[in-house]
Image: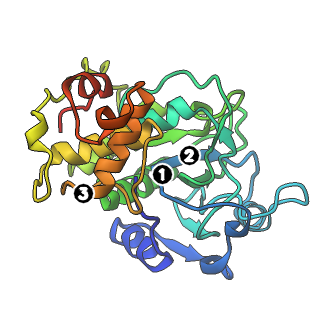
Amino acid sequence: MAKPLSASKLVEILRAEGLTVHEVRSWRTHNRNSKGPWGPVNGVMIHHTVTSGTAASVDICYDGYSSLPGPLCHGVIDKKGHVHLVGNGRANHAGLGDGDVLRAVINESRLPADNEADTDGNRHFYGFECINLGNGKDPWPEAQKEAIEKVAAAICRHHGWSERSVIGHKEWQPGKVDPRGFTMDGMRSRIRDRLKGAGGGGKPAPDPKPAPRPSYEPFPGAAFFHVGQRSPIITAMGRRLVAEGCSRYEEGPSPDWSEADRRSYALWQQKQGFSGKDADGIPGKLTWDRLKVPKS
């Protein structure tokens, strides 16, 4: 969960990653913010355009269609690996997707099957369209795949996310197949290596091994939660509360225990059936164990 990047910061981090960036027309003020909220952002979504040709593809993603106005993403990645920025803010790229997938992205855990379309993805994801016909035959040049890796890694690095905050459209919305032509597990492996400092480097990336069984923070005791307490456990707790729809945060969880944490936890206690003094916002062992706060 994070505050969206400004236009200037996005350009800065992409170029710092070694990418060639083209700023298209009035992209810095081009968005769909009048139609719904933009942010908090939780991840990066990769698409293919089902088009060919750089100029035509960029124009379509900037302008959109009569039935779906642009921008249709935040950036277009061409076959040469150049990034064409077409929107800054809410964009029509993700549509409605699976809320369980969003929660997994927030928790950076294994993705569930996308079998629901109940959550606004345009609010929560940066979107990048990659020029490809999506027919399984149109090739993906290494320069283009490396650019996808770099774009995702730059955004993840800025927000402090891992590669598990990067998904394909096909992992978000039932019935979608994009991006087609490479596996998202393989791409996440490349992004993981780049975040560690290795980079993809054009080497084929094996699919990752199955994720280990998650481990959770043991209950630290009610006395742990007080004004002045600072701990990554509090941040992890806040992220879980957001994932469960129990948020009273304005800018997202932080390591410092605050009134927003207490109010958010009170919502979780109420969701578990507690009320009155039993829903005072101070964690107890029963509700803590049910929340399953991952170890930081």
| Placement of 34 over or under 181, stated as above or below | below
Q: Quadrant of the C terminus?
A: top left
- Foreground residue, 36 or 206? 36
Q: Residue furthest right?
A: 66
Q: In the rendered structure, which disc, 1 or 3, sits on the residue that comes first in sequence?
A: 1
Q: Nearer the viewer, mark 2 or mark 3?
A: 3
Q: In the rendered structure, which disc, 2 or 3, sits on the residue that comes first in sequence?
A: 2
Q: Nearer the viewer, mark 1 or mark 3?
A: 3
Residue tagged by mark 1?
148
Label 2 Cα crowd, 10 Å radius (few <14 / some 14-19 / many 20+): many
Residue tagged by mark 2?
46
| Placement of 264 over or under 150, stated as above or below | above
CB atoms of marks 1 and 3 within 8 Å: no
Q: Nearer the viewer, mark 2 or mark 1?
A: 2
- Foreground residue, 215 or 196? 215
Q: CA distance from mark 2 to mark 1?
A: 8 Å
Mark 1 lies on a secondary structure that is helix
Horizontal arrangement in the rendering, residue 113 relative to residue 24 (left or right): left
**Who's the residue at 50% across and 38% down the image?**
102
Tell me the kind of residue under disc 1: Ile
**Would residue 204 be seen by someone viewing this image from the given angle?**
no
Q: Position of residue 223 (x, y in %)?
A: 8, 41
Q: CA distance from mark 1 to mark 3?
A: 38 Å
Tell me the kind of residue under disc 3: Ser
Residue tagged by mark 3?
258
